[in-house]
Amino acid sequence: MIKRITAHLFGFTLVGLGVSLIIFSNQGAFPLDALNWFLAELTPIEFVDNGVWNYIMSTVIAIVTYLIIRKPKVFISIIMVLFVSLAISLFGSLISNTLPEHIALKIILAPVGLITIAFGANFTIVSGLPAAPVEQLMVVLTLHTNSLKRSRYYMEAVFAVFAIIAGLIYGDLFKQIGWFSIVAILFIGPLMELLMPLNEKIIGLKENENEVK
């Protein structure tokens, strides 16, 4: 169990690092991450940053999921996702204050961030512990769409609409919505599948053995 918990929290931390790298790159983030960033910039409270909004939106998504399936266990993920939010706040501040604003570096950091997210997300899957609220909602929607891929695209489309609205209000839509947003959505799945054997080898667990006994 200790190995599972360690892998789970480490995975969430990596996801937070990956999100921060993509946000810093300004090449285009995942729609939900872009929405969180725009909301943070629009919030006139200094300590309410991207990480805080990530936690707020995760809580909202958990509530929506609960209203659909009426199972209180979905709220367990809110505790776990705190590590993602803290990582986003910590790494976001560290990266923006230490790395130079060079376009070549940013173009490199975008795919590095995506790989980091895929690698981290796999740890949370292999651990067998509760997934993040957004993944839980995706699984619930799959029961109705009969397609995990279709459910993910539906969710990304909804998040994209809200991100675009927030970006327009912010006044610079392309600050976090760009070409890499499309790349991230299309390649996160294949990257996770490609890296999964490495994740399993590192922690000695397999995806089909991830149920906590």
Image: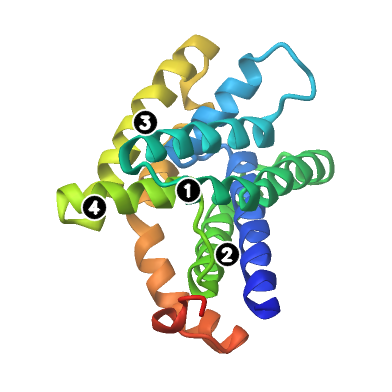
- Judge the density around disc 4: few (<14), some (14-19), many (≥20) Cα neighbours within 10 Å: some
How far apart marks 2 and 1 lie (CA) works out to: 20 Å
- Numbered disc 4: secondary structure: helix
Task: Examine the image and state in which quarter residue 93 appears.
Answer: top right
Please name the amino acid that badge 2 sits on.
Gly
Looking at the image, is mark 3 or mark 1 earlier in the sequence?
A: 1
How far apart marks 2 and 3 lie (CA) works out to: 23 Å
How far apart marks 4 and 2 lie (CA) works out to: 22 Å
Mark 4 in CB contact with mark 2 (< 8 angstroms): no
Residue drawn where x is 47% and y is 21% of the image: 173
Q: Nearer the viewer, residue 152 or 138?
A: 138
Q: Which residue is mark 3?
A: 160
How far apart marks 3 and 1 lie (CA) works out to: 24 Å
Q: Which residue is mark 2?
A: 120
Looking at the image, is mark 3 or mark 4 earlier in the sequence?
A: 4
Q: Which residue is mark 4?
A: 142
Residue drawn where x is 68% and y is 58% of the image: 13
Q: Where 51 falls versus 35 (above or below)?
A: below
Q: Which residue is mark 1?
A: 74
Looking at the image, is mark 4 or mark 2 earlier in the sequence?
A: 2
Q: Position of residue 56 (x, y in %)?
A: 59, 31
Looking at the image, is mark 4 or mark 1 earlier in the sequence?
A: 1
Left or right of 15: which side holds 149? left
Residue drawn where x is 41% and y is 47% of the image: 71
Please name the amino acid that badge 1 sits on.
Val
**In this view of the protein, can residue 184 be seen by the observer?**
no
- Judge the density around disc 1: few (<14), some (14-19), many (≥20) Cα neighbours within 10 Å: many
Mark 2 in CB contact with mark 1 (< 8 angstroms): no
Q: Which mark is residue 105?
A: none
How far apart marks 4 and 1 lie (CA) works out to: 16 Å
Q: Where 175 falls versus 79 (above or below)?
A: above
